[in-house]
Structure formats: structure tokens, C-alpha cells
Image (spheres, rainbow, N blue to C red):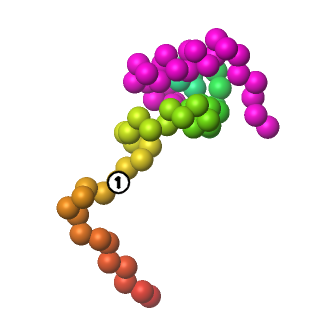
Amino acid sequence: MRMQWTAQQVADLKRLWRAGKSATEIALALGVTRGAITGKLDRLGLMGRGGAMRKESPPDSPPVRRIPF
């Protein structure tokens, strides 16, 4: 079930996200779950800020070799 976002909540979400706040910090400020925040950010197309959400290995690191058991 999706929550109903007010125009003010969306404005606050955008403002806090652009100010560099984490999804957890925003969730605490708005009184909703972190999942609600990340879902709304995704629907608004704002998730691509970088940071901890999408960690990638450095480009020069060798691939991980899996050893079968």
C-alpha cells in the first residue's frame, strides 16, 4: 500500500535530499519509513545522487574469483 504524499511532504523531501540528508535522516524528519522515502525518491527520479546506495568496485580492481565447493 502506498502512502498519500502531500505537496508539502514532497517539497520537504526534495529540499532535504538536495541538502545532502540521507534517506534515514529524511524519514525521521518526515515521520515515515526509509522505504517510503527511497520509493518516492525513485519515482521522482532523484535516486542517482551517488553515495552509499550504489557502491561499485573501483575500475582497476580485479574481478572476484569464485571457488566452487
Quadrant of the image occupied by residue 3:
top right
Closer to the camera in the image, 14 or 64: 14
The residue shown at (24%, 69%) is 62
The residue shown at (23%, 63%) is 61
Instruction: Give the residue furthest to the left.
Output: 60
Q: 13 left or right of 68? A: right
Residue type, numbered disc 1: Glu
The dominant secondary structure in magenta is helix
Quadrant of the image occupied by residue 32:
top right
Is 21 placed above or below 12 here?
below
Q: What percent of the width, then of the height, locates residue 50?
A: 38, 39
Is 28 placed above or below 65 here?
above
Is 37 placed above or below 13 here?
below
Q: Secondary structure at mark 1?
A: loop
The residue shown at (64%, 11%) is 8
Is 64 covered by the magenta stretch?
no
Instruction: Give the residue furthest to the right.
Output: 1
The residue shown at (61%, 19%) is 10
Q: Quadrant of the N terminus?
A: top right
Task: Provide the residue span drawn in magenta.
Answer: 1-25
Q: What percent of the width, then of the height, locates residue 2?
A: 76, 34
Q: What percent of the width, then of the height, locates residue 57?
A: 30, 57
Q: 48 left or right of 42? A: left
- Visible in this render: residue 34? no
Q: 64 left or right of 27? A: left
Instruction: Give the residue furthest to the top.
Output: 8
Residue carrying label 1: 56
Instruction: Give the residue furthest to the front.
Output: 45
Closer to the camera in the image, 65 or 8: 8
Is 17 covered by the magenta stretch?
yes
Quadrant of the image occupied by residue 37:
top right
Q: What percent of the width, then of the height, locates residue 54?
A: 42, 47
